[in-house]
């Protein structure tokens, strides 16, 4: 399902802003949702703010693929679900999406209420694919309403 990365990225980028360098923003300088720190980490180690301002579409894709898509095993997820989980990761961070999905995953080997490990691996992807998630009335935590609805739809075996 990696074939969906380009489409998922295009959808995510519709809600990302352009240049921002607000001193009050803990992310610092950002272009198209890419922070200078992530640009340096995944594209160009010695990048300047000017380099970030002129980031290419290919460089944007590199950062989003490596920092978000790969972190949530986007290629292993079903069509539509891959985008929703990717979008969740972009908005809340890859470790948080892993924790949330692990918290609502119905796994008899995991004690109820156990904290997730913050890593979205093969087991997490398998749980999403198999819709092993708790019913909506058992979901706890400050999840964004759209993402909670996604998880409820998965539990009812609805397809996106």
Image: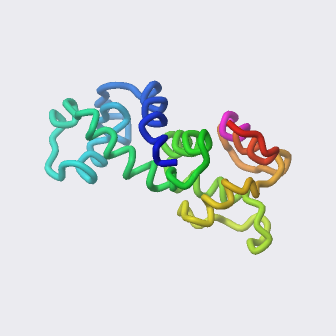
Q: Position of residue 119 (x, y in %)?
A: 53, 63
- In which quadrant of the rendered view does residue 144 lie? top right
Residue numbers of the magenta segment: 145-149
Screen quadrant of the C terminus: top right
Q: Nearer the viewer, residue 80 or 16?
A: 80
Residue located at (18% from left, 49% from top): 44
In the picture as drawn, the residue positioned furthest to the bottom comes out as 109
Q: Residue at (39%, 51%) from the top-left corner?
A: 67
Q: Which x, y percent locates residue 155? A: 79, 48
Magenta residue check for 139: no
**How far from the left and from the top, in percent, is residue 38?**
31, 48
Between 4 and 156, the residue placed more toward the observer is 4
Q: Quadrant of residue 123?
A: bottom right
Left or right of 69? Residue 97 is: right
Residue at 22 percent across and 36 percent down: it is 52
Q: Quadrant of residue 153?
A: top right
In the rendered image, residue 58, in percent from the top left (x then y), is placed at 27, 38
């Amino acid at each position: 399902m990696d074939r969906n990365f380009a489409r998922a990225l295009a959808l995510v980028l519709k809600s990302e802003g352009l240049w921002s360098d607000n001193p009050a923003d803990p992310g610092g300088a950002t272009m198209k949702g890419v922070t200078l720190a992530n640009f340096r980490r995944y594209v160009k180690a010695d990048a300047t703010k000017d380099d970030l301002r002129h980031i290419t579409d290919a460089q944007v894709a590199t950062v989003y693929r490596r920092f978000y898509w790969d972190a949530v095993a986007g290629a292993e997820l079903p069509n539509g679900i891959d985008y929703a989980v990717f979008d969740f990761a972009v908005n809340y961070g890859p470790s948080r999406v892993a924790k949330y999905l692990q918290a609502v995953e119905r796994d008899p080997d995991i004690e109820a209420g156990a904290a997730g490990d913050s890593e979205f691996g093969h087991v997490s992807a398998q749980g999403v694919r198999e819709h092993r998630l708790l019913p909506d009335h058992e979901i706890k935590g400050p999840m964004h309403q759209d993402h909670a609805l996604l998880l409820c739809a998965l539990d009812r075996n609805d397809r996106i």
